[in-house]
Image: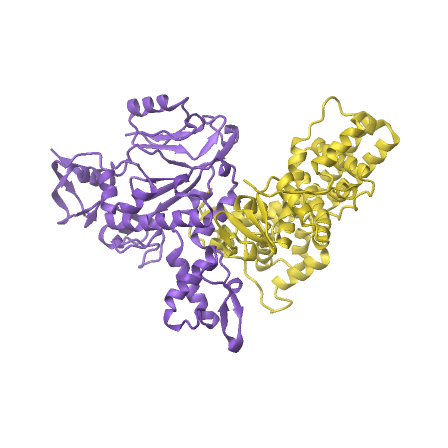
Amino acid sequence: MSAVQLRVVLTPEDFSHYPFLPEALSNLKDLELTLEEIASTPLGNLILDKAKERLLKAVEGKELPPPEEDYMLEVAVFYTTLLILAGVGDDRLTEKFSTLYAKSVRVFLLNDLEKGFREKLLYLAVKVFGWDARPGDSKVLLYFKHFVFAQPEFTGEWKLTNKVLERGYVEVSWRELVRLLETGVKKYVVSLVQKAEISGNIPEEVYRVVEEVSRAWSARQQDIRSVAGEISSRRGEDALPPCIRELLHQQLSGRNLPHSARFALASFLLNIGFSVEEVLEVFRHSPDFREDIARYQVEHIAGLRGSRVKYLPYKCDNMRSYGLCRWSCEGVKHPLQYFYRVLRGRRVKVKELW
Amino acid sequence: MLPPSHPEKREYGFQLFGAHGMLRHVSFRGDNELNEFLRTRVPQHAYYSTALYENPSAPEMDEKGWLGAELVFDIDIDHVDTPCKELHDTWRCRNCGAEGRGQLRACPVCGSENLERKSWVCDICINAARDEALKLLDLLENDFGISRDEASITFSGHRGFHVHVQREDLLGLDQDARREISDYVRGLGLEVELLLRRSKGGLYAFRYNAETPGWPGRIAKYSALMLSERITGGSLPELPKAEWTRLIKLAVDELSAKIDEKVTIDVHRLIRLPGTLHGKTGLKVLELSASELEALTAEDILRRALVFGNEEVRVRIDKPPSRALFYTVEGSSGVIKAPLHLALYLCLNGGAEILR
């Protein structure tokens, strides 16, 4: 569909910044590095160690280390990380790693944009992700199907309704394209893990890393379950409407929730009597948690900053429109209404809509 | 009956006369088998999945192997305010027993939403639904680049229209994507602040002009029409924010397509099979081209969907609607004379009885 002619010169630095590029992988293939070699050579061990380090950072929800300058090493570490993720086989960890990884790639995307390497961004969009993107001087026209695929938020200026959409193409700024590419990278990495196949037996050394990462991840999940347990025992999870329950579970399992979802969850919890500290404890499990930013935002929602207004969660109609709810609760127009009804001992009939 | 595309990959659902519940997870190897089933079992309602599956007859959703789903829109007159509802729709509150005419969300006496409703369809309803379908086709074409040839339209045989987008490249859209498209055609989530620019004296200018594509341009055009007497030098006047907010809301109410968003968002939906009869009306689920939808009157559409004859029969009915299909029904409870197709509708939908 695209009529874009792209001429891009990819440098070793690009392969290091974007090791998921198919060209980077074909370079690695030239090396003919096998899993056995990763397990048994000094270079292989270095690769394995670096991959493990990245995954343990992801388990902790910490920023990933910068890529290796030696692009061959970076590409090898990147793909080894994906193989280990495939070995662990936990979708939530894959999601968490991919989110953090995409955030780290965003820095290079922005750099390339600032240096005026727009064709590189287009190359990623069109050739790697298969999007239909048509460049203009100040804007890019992106086919709506690919825009909604990569949309980071479903409200405000990201909402499709607020975009200029003509004959199937959404007008986005180059900076917006970078944000969309970040989601593109995340989803692409997830798909690479899903497609990763290990042929033959996994060498002992690699298997040991898979086990170590799995153990660290389960221990982390245990912490999360204890927070969830506390919420249920203190407030009774049944009193939470299905939308908030779902958001809470997603949050506690380390999913990267959009801003609107975090707002809905934080404002709900604050309104049913959680303290700022307790709400922060819930958000500590976000893949991109930063205490200073999160604290500022939660205090803002609690009415301790800025306008000094304590925010209410969205009403049900808006929850559905923002994609945060797929239920209909009889006679309930606001999530807090559900909570108070159940606390008063009334049953609320819930129907899943889609 | 015209089979859907990829008939062997669809799940079918049927409600049979006299049977409770729905026969689901049915699949057929092709059109012939499907036709054979319809001819021999003669179901009261026939549905097929908008989704394509590897194993459409698997009883559990996660075993079916979802391959994609058509992008569909359902325009149901329940979502549109029409004056005719006072003529034919009734309600009774299960909580306090109050009753009345029209379409209400909650009982005006006790506030309960537990209402028993009886609704009918008439040419005024279908005309309003047709307008919504035409607005939807415009939005799909101008904004999404989905041409009229790529949209297949059916009259549902009851209270509205279904629009199926026949585009293989859109089959894989996930629920978030479908919700965004659904919100778009409903004009949902528009932010007034993003459309306005602060000007002098606490007034605001509209950022876009009528040439801009999408909702911004659509609203600019509407505003130009509404404010025609106040336009100077070809540009829209500057107004207080509250006035813009009101105007934008009016524009969205007028220009958005009133679809049932649940149908668009659901990727496992069963929808009526074109060419079969609607079991509540006896009308045919009728395929129409976009130009037919534009050119035909509501009465024409209903007449085309008639399958049963004109012969007059006597019907006993309690509280008939004042208007049904394209007929004005005279008289209250008792025996009335009606053509067979109307009599059947009164029976199927309203518990009337045809007298021999």
**Image quadrant for the C terminus of chain B?**
top left
Q: Position of residue A66 (x, y in %)?
A: 79, 46
Nearest the camera: B356 or B272? B272
Looking at the image, which residue sits at the far bottom?
B201
Q: Would you say residue B94 is visible in this rendering?
A: no
Q: Position of residue A96 (x, y in %)?
A: 68, 43
Describe the colour scheme in one phrase: by chain
Nearest the camera: A45 or B97? A45
Colour in which chain B is drawn = purple
Nearest the camera: B103 or A349? B103
**Image quadrant for the N terminus of chain B?**
top left
Colour in which chain A is drawn = yellow
Q: Would you say residue A41 is visible in this rendering?
A: yes
Q: Is residue B229 above or below residue B308?
A: below
**Does B224 sit left or right of A302 as displayed?**
left
Q: Position of residue A351 (x, y in %)?
A: 45, 44
Nearest the camera: A62 or A116? A116
**Does A93 sit left or right of B123 as displayed?**
right
Q: Is residue B307 above or below residue A163?
A: above
Looking at the image, which residue sits at the far right?
A42
Give the number of marks.
0
**Does A184 sit left or right of B286 as displayed?**
right
Quarter-wise, where is residue B165 in the image? Answer: top left
Q: Position of residue A115 (x, y in %)?
A: 73, 53
Q: Is residue B208 above or below residue A284?
A: below
Residue at the spot 75% in from the left edge and 48% down from the top edge: A62
Quarter-wise, where is residue A255 in the image? Answer: top right
Residue at the spot 65% in from the left edge and 49% down from the top edge: A230
